Image (tube, helix red, strand yellow):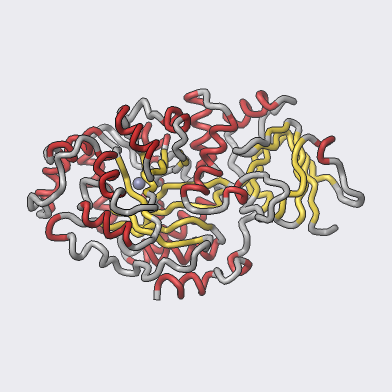
Amino acid sequence: MKSVRLIHAALVADGANVQAAPGALLLDGRRVVGVGSPEEVGRPAGVEVESLHAHAVMPAFVNAHTHLDLTACGYRPYDGDFDAWLLDILAFRSQQTPESVDASVAQGVRALDAGGVAAVGDIAGHQAPHPSLKHLAAAGIGGVSFTEIFGMGPRIPGAFDVPGAPTSPGPPGAYLRPGWQPHAPYSSDRRVFAASLETGYPVSTHLSESPEEIEFIRSGTGRFRRFLEKLGVWDGSAHVGVRHPVDWLAQILQGAPGARALCAHCNYVDDPALDILAAGQFDVAFCPRSSAYFGHVGHRYREMLQRGITVALGTDSMVCLTTPDRLSTFDEFRFLMRRDGLDLSTALAMATIHGARALGLSEDAFRFATGVAQESAGITQVPLDRPGSTVAAAAHALAHTQAAPAWLLRPQAPDSHPNQNQPQILRNYCL
Ligand SMILES: [Zn+2]
């Protein structure tokens, strides 16, 4: 019975249909074999109760969009001057060496681990693809490491020539896979998007983040046009004159049946774009604190959820976060509960199973599923002030706690993933 653990907690909750206060969780190894109230779960003979009477117990979190290579940049205040902000970030990037990129990614992976995150959509910039796969694999963190590419005008032919970029999509069903991230519709031509989708790798991008992006896609004018001209990559060949960035990407996705695009932000979505998102091959990675940092308001994530769109949560990079020790969607779902009054179940679903779905992982690994073969990706615990004795009281305490999540069950050791240990991952993808 050594591998059997019985946990009692003030709140046991997941993003599916588990909510119990007080709650109990019965584990056999990494498998959930009982969940509910302490009475419902009972106590197998010879098993001691692990008491967490002032804690919430939840599945591991999924961070569907972040930039690990920017972790060392740290928080930078934003005063509304986007060009100045971008120059600041580019200055940081220009000083990065292969060694400092590696260190920044490693710091980012530690920040994921410190936030109870077991799967991630990492956007690996210049020099970062290999460190991203290496450090994620070493930590047993799954998901997709998207290599970021840029390609407009004369840079289109070399868009995929990124040092250290993966050379194989690896075996299907792997817990950690490489992908491509054409940066955005204003920085990567439609031919680059189409070529990314044709590879069969998972594809992500930034989409409809700002009004300036809509202007560029509509008329080829504005700040992004000036930026491309400054970089010397505007040659007039960019495909513009499309109503909205969502329409623009939908046209490209039509040429790639079965493919999906994980789209970060989607801050500006009107009714026709919402219809296209709901009908099409889109998943959304919503980064609430990042949107707030840049002053974007009125995100339509609740309508997206009602329309059946998978809306996962992401943190975006450490640059916009005031939690220097962690990169966790734990803070995103609590932010939405406090700011928008979002209910615990929906918020937790966005931070766990929606992210798993968007990254092609098993949803069962990120909820308290009994009667399934799937092992848990990890289980987190968070101390609560005054948790009370109801789900509502405990959810309120969870939304307002200052504490960080800790592991009750860590992500699986990397060498326990069958055929997917760290050296094999690097061999599969990078050599
Ligand atoms: Zn991003």
Does residue 377 appear left or right of residue 253 in this picture?
A: right
Percent position of residue 265, x then y? 36, 39
Q: Nearer the viewer, residue 168 or 24?
A: 168
Percent position of residue 336, x then y? 49, 30
Residue at (12, 54) in percent of width and height: 233
Q: Nearer the viewer, residue 253 or 345?
A: 253
Q: Nearer the viewer, residue 170 or 50?
A: 170
Residue at (56, 46) in percent of width and height: 61
> Which picture quadrant has residue 56?
top right
Percent position of residue 229, x then y? 9, 49
Tally of numbered tags: 0
Q: Nearer the viewer, residue 220 or 118?
A: 220
Does residue 142 appear left or right of residue 228 in this picture?
A: right
Can see residue 125?
A: no
Quadrant of image for the N terminus:
bottom right
Residue at (69, 28) in percent of width and height: 387
Percent position of residue 11, x then y? 70, 34
> Which picture quadrant has residue 277?
top left
Can see residue 82?
A: yes
Residue at (11, 38) in percent of width and height: 221
Quadrant of image for the C terminus:
bottom left
Name the residue at the left extreme: 235
Does residue 116 appear left or right of residue 169 in this picture?
A: right
Does residue 367 appear left or right of residue 188 in this picture?
A: right
> Which picture quadrant has residue 389?
top right
